[in-house]
């Protein structure tokens, strides 16, 4: 049987029309397969981390693995669509090369060793406190007059594009409490 491209499209189209008249509803079939695929999966919302647009994503996780990723139709930013970078986000959480615990490299060492989250947080907090105390400015003299300063110039903070407004607000407040005015955001640079 020698079928041209036009004849093939006619056969496929007429078969589809015939199935539709027999009661097959393609939308219902597609919805049923999606329900089957996602049965037992937990749904989470997340934000794409590739650029500063803040596109919202729906993530479906089953047995600790990301099994489905799609744009969030309720998002006012991306309205359910994702770019090619956003769609490829699904490989990141399931990668065997993904670091899942904090790593520490001791001074002079050439090897990274896993440590607990408590140890990592304690080390970072200790370094921040040590740096803040060492470089603390109580007062500043300008034109012979002393002004209260209460700041450190040795600490700066850089936010990221994946941080929503609420996180940026909290981080800004935290940096002000530490005593630094150097707060910047990656999306502005």
Image (tube, rainbow, N blue to C red):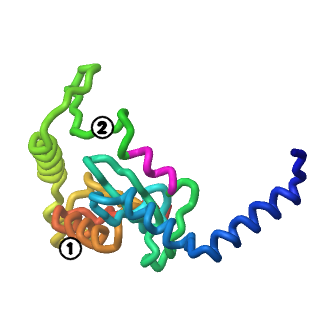
Q: Is residue 89 magenta?
A: yes
Category of crowding for the residue at label 1, using alpha-carbon neighbours closer than 10 angstroms: few (below 14), some (14–19), many (at least 20) = few
Checking the image for residue 28, the label placed there is: none
Checking the image for residue 145, the label placed there is: 1
**Which residue ends up furthest to the front in the rendered image?**
22
Which structural element holds mark 2?
A: loop
Q: For the point 49% across and 59% down, which residue is it?
A: 51
Q: Nearer the viewer, residue 54 or 45?
A: 45
What segment carries the magenta color? 87-92
- Residue 79: give x, y in percent of width and height: 50, 75
Checking the image for residue 99, the label placed there is: 2
- Residue 165: give x, y in percent of width and height: 34, 73
| Drawn side of residue 12 relative to residue 61, left or right | right
Q: For the point 26% across and 54% down, which residue is it?
A: 155
Q: Nearer the viewer, residue 19 or 81?
A: 19
Query: Is any part of residue 134 visible from this angle?
Result: no
Q: Is residue 6 magenta?
A: no
Q: For the point 15% across and 42% down, which residue is it?
A: 120
| Corner quadrant of residue 114 | top left
Q: Earlier in the sequence, mark 2 or mark 1?
A: 2
Q: Nearer the viewer, residue 7 or 85?
A: 7
Which structural element holds mark 1?
A: strand
How many numbered markers are drawn?
Answer: 2
Point out the frontmost of discs 2 and 1: 2
The image shows residue 153, relative to residue 53, as above or below, that is above
| Drawn side of residue 154 relative to residue 25, left or right | left
């Amino acid at each position: 049987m020698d079928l041209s491209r036009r004849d093939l499209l006619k056969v496929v189209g007429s078969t589809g029309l015939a199935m539709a008249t027999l009661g097959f509803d393609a939308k219902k079939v597609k919805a049923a397969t999606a329900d089957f695929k996602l049965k037992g999966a937990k749904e989470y919302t997340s934000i794409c981390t590739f650029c500063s647009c803040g596109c919202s994503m729906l993530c479906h996780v089953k047995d600790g693995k990301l099994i489905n990723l799609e744009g969030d139709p309720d998002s006012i930013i991306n309205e359910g669509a994702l770019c090619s970078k956003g769609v490829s986000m699904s490989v990141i959480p399931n990668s065997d090369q993904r670091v899942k615990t904090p790593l520490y490299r001791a001074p002079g060492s050439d090897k990274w060793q896993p440590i607990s989250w408590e140890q990592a947080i304690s080390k970072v907090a200790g370094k921040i406190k040590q740096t803040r105390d060492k470089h603390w400015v109580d007062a500043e003299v300008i034109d012979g007059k002393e002004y209260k300063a209460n700041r450190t110039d040795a600490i700066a903070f850089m936010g990221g594009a994946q941080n929503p407004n609420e996180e940026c607000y909290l981080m800004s407040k935290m940096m002000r409490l530490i005593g630094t005015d150097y707060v910047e955001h990656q999306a502005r640079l």
